[in-house]
Image (tube, grey):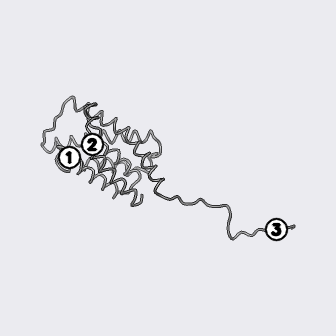
Amino acid sequence: MNWLNTTILLLTTVLAVYWEASFNGLRHFLGAQVDLLPALVVYASLYGSLATLSMVALGGGLLFDSLSLNPLGISVLPLFLCGLGIHTSRELILRDQTFAQVVLGFAASLATPILVLLLLLTTRHEPLFGWGTLWQITVMSIGGAIATPVFFEVFGFLNRMFSHTTPGQSSFRPDREIRRGRM
């Protein structure tokens, strides 16, 4: 992943947090807000370096916490742990398969709010917890599962648009001798 891809990914992280905080139509319709940060963390952990993953988790988590009622920094560790778990085994994951992307997006979108909830409970905060929490986690997980392949397609398109491809090998060798005539 080059600097342009990393910059686009970080810009998308900022825009995703802004969209979550500004547009409430989906939140009012479903009763829960779809969290796009775990889907971005899945993409960063599969295609980026550990530094890129850290920047997405740290920047996205801090921005998300600053615009929500969460204590500042509580979302950073769950986002990073989900991304690190995927990053360590990314050679074994079929990253180009849509089914694998959906499963990873679902798992990360399920694990992140549960880890945030556990951190809130262990730090003596009193989050609102009840049957509505189960609905919100379900909506967030399904929304993350749907958003992950969309991000993969968008970033794949942007990568094809802004990066150059290396030319393929030619069958012609310049040091080859061509014999003409009768033998």
**What percent of the width, then of the height, locates residue 74?**
20, 48
- Residue 67 is tagged as 1
Task: Give the residue at x 42% y 47%.
Answer: 154
Whether residue 157 is situated above or below residue 131 in the rendered picture: below
- Residue 157 is tagged as none
Q: CA distance from mark 2 to mark 3?
A: 70 Å
Going by the numbered disc 3, the residue's amino acid type is: Arg
Q: CA distance from mark 2 to mark 1?
A: 9 Å
Residues marked 2 and 1 touching at CB (< 8 Å): yes
Whether residue 114 is situated above or below residue 2 in the rendered picture: above
Side of 153 where 70 appears, left or right = left
Task: Give the residue at x 39% y 45%.
Answer: 151
Nearer to us in this view, 16 or 123: 16
- How packed mark 3 is, by other alpha carbons closer than 10 Å (few <14, some 14-19, many 20 or more), is few
Going by the numbered disc 1, the residue's amino acid type is: Leu
The quadrant of the rendering that contains the N terminus is: bottom left
**What percent of the width, then of the height, locates residue 96?**
47, 45
Disc 1 or disc 3, which is closer to the eye? Answer: 1
**What percent of the width, then of the height, locates residue 121?**
16, 41
Side of 134 where 146 appears, left or right = right
Task: Give the residue at x 36% y 47%.
Answer: 42
The quadrant of the rendering that contains the C terminus is: bottom right
Q: CA distance from mark 1 to mark 3?
A: 76 Å
- Which residue bears the numbered disc 2? 20
- Which residue bears the numbered disc 3? 180
Q: Earlier in the sequence, mark 2 or mark 1?
A: 2
Task: Give the residue at x 27% y 50%.
Answer: 60
Q: How many marks?
A: 3
> In what element is the residue under mark 3?
loop
Q: Earlier in the sequence, mark 1 or mark 3?
A: 1
- How packed mark 1 is, by other alpha carbons closer than 10 Å (few <14, some 14-19, many 20 or more), is some
